[in-house]
Amino acid sequence: MRCDRVWRHARLATMTNDDMGLVEDGLIASSDGIILYAGPASIAPAWDAADVVDCGGRWITPGLIDCHTHLIHGADRAQEFEMRLAGASYEEIARTGGGILSTMRATRAASEDALVAHALPRLDALIAEGVTTVEVKSGYGLCAESEIRMLRAARRLCRERRVGITTTFLGAHALPPEYADDADGYIAMLCNDLLPQVATLGLTDAVDAFCEGIGFTPAQTERMFAAAARHGLPVKLHAEQLSNLHGAALAARHGALSADHLEYLDQDGIAAMATSGTIATLLPGAYYFVRETRLPPIEGLRRAGVPIALATDCNPGTSPLTSLLLVMNMGATLFRLTIAECLAGVTRNAARALGLRDRGTLEPGKRCDLAIWDIDRPAELVYRMGFNPLHARIWSGS
Ligand code: DI6
Ligand code: FE
């Protein structure tokens, strides 16, 4: 049978089952950027390929997927980090005009070109470790013009690099100064004016909110979800990061793709997520960086069969992190996830957290997004810290 390309003498972690779907002597065939075959060489059809790559026994996984980032933002907050090291708390810094609002000012001041230019080094760091799809949120503009500019900048990233980008509208991330003391008014503006604009322009693939004491209430979150439904957009939620407002259960009731963070998630939230098929996206970089001590309820999620995704949460305030390999290491070390759970978290389950059925595993019919690794066993991807064993990255078949 004819195809464009074959990778042979490879070991595969197809991620098609909970044991990573391992294949010792594997072969992948692709045409037009789509996998035609991924499995044992011994039972593969005889492929007639224009291009045959001998992998020399290297491991191939699906291209990695970072399903929760704030990659587009105006400036970093290293200075705030110094203040925190000197004893100031995140809340104190926020009260004195720092925190999210300082990033808002920098983001509003940045042109679309500047936002793209500032994000590219972060995107390149992800790509260098085999990432082939990245979710990017808005939420540092907090006004129509700047939120739209952020989403346009995010969409541009996939024209600047060979990578899949999905965008998420996170207007309900923080309350901008124009609406101080009027959170309901801000939410009404988002629902009635800004989200319809963003949806009409085709700039977003999903809607997210920050449901938290320092963010928005469950009632306000629900208004965002209702507006998202009016535009046919799926929802996700920053939930139970710092306290338990029962956001995950609310998200589940609205059929959310994912609920993210979840350190303070309770059993009712877990049960609701299990019923709705909502993915639990854990963000160990934020847990680490804010020195959180409360662990997400991993065992409860496992018992209920809630699929777990892992992501960087790359943002300037609580997770200035651009390594999914390190995220996997943190997932194992801090959250006690298994190797198979860590890898599923940045492939199969990350795809589900984005509602993308066309990637995340090595199977016929899926996109041919691959990461080829110089390792002897998959555990090495999780075990090392600050070491990058990527041999090659294939996006859309080449
Ligand atoms: N959760 C977080 O940890 C970040 N946003 C959110 O919703 C914080 C973002 C920042 O401090 O800039
Ligand atoms: Fe986040």
Image: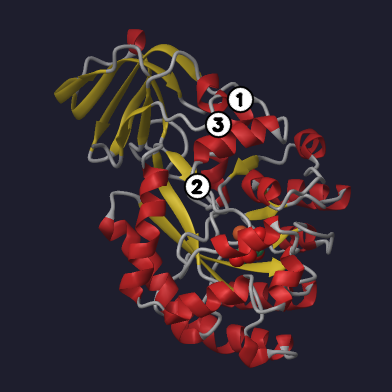
Q: Quadrant of the N terminus?
A: top left
**Residue at x 57%, y 50% (from the top left corner):** 353
**Can residue 278 be seen at all in this image of the molecule?**
no
Assess whether mark 3 and mark 1 are in contact (beta carbons under 8 angstroms).
Answer: yes
**Viewer-proximal residue among 37 and 257:** 257
**Viewer-proximal residue among 51 and 242:** 242
Marks 3 and 2, the one that precedes in the sequence? 2
Locate residue 267, reporting x and y percent: 87, 47
Q: As shown in the figure, which amino acid type bears the numbered disc 2?
A: Asp
Q: As shown in the figure, which amino acid type bears the numbered disc 3?
A: Leu
Q: In which quarter of the image is the C terminus?
A: top left
Determine crowd level at label 3: few under 14, some 14-19, many 20+ residues with C-alpha closer than 10 A. many
In the rendered image, the vertical position of residue 25 relative to residue 119, given as above or below:
above
In the rendered image, the vertical position of residue 118 relative to residue 298, given as above or below:
below
Disc 2 under 8 Å from ligand 2? The reply is no
Q: In this view, does 70 lie to the left or right of 27?
A: right
**Viewer-proximal residue among 363 and 73:** 73
**Residue at x 27%, y 40% (from the top left corner):** 33
Ligand 2 picture quarter: bottom right
User: Which numbered tag is attached to residue 343?
Assistant: 3
Marks counted in the figure total 3
Residue at numbered disc 1: 339
Q: Is mark 3 on a helix, strand or loop?
A: helix
How far is disc 1 from disc 3 in space, using C-alphas?
Answer: 6 Å
Determine crowd level at label 2: few under 14, some 14-19, many 20+ residues with C-alpha closer than 10 A. many
User: Which numbered tag is attached to residue 66?
Assistant: 2
**Residue at x 52%, y 52% (from the top left corner):** 355
**Viewer-proximal residue among 86 and 41:** 86
Q: In this view, does 331 lie to the left or right of 141?
A: right
Q: What element carries label 1?
A: helix
**Residue at x 53%, y 25% (from the top left corner):** 384
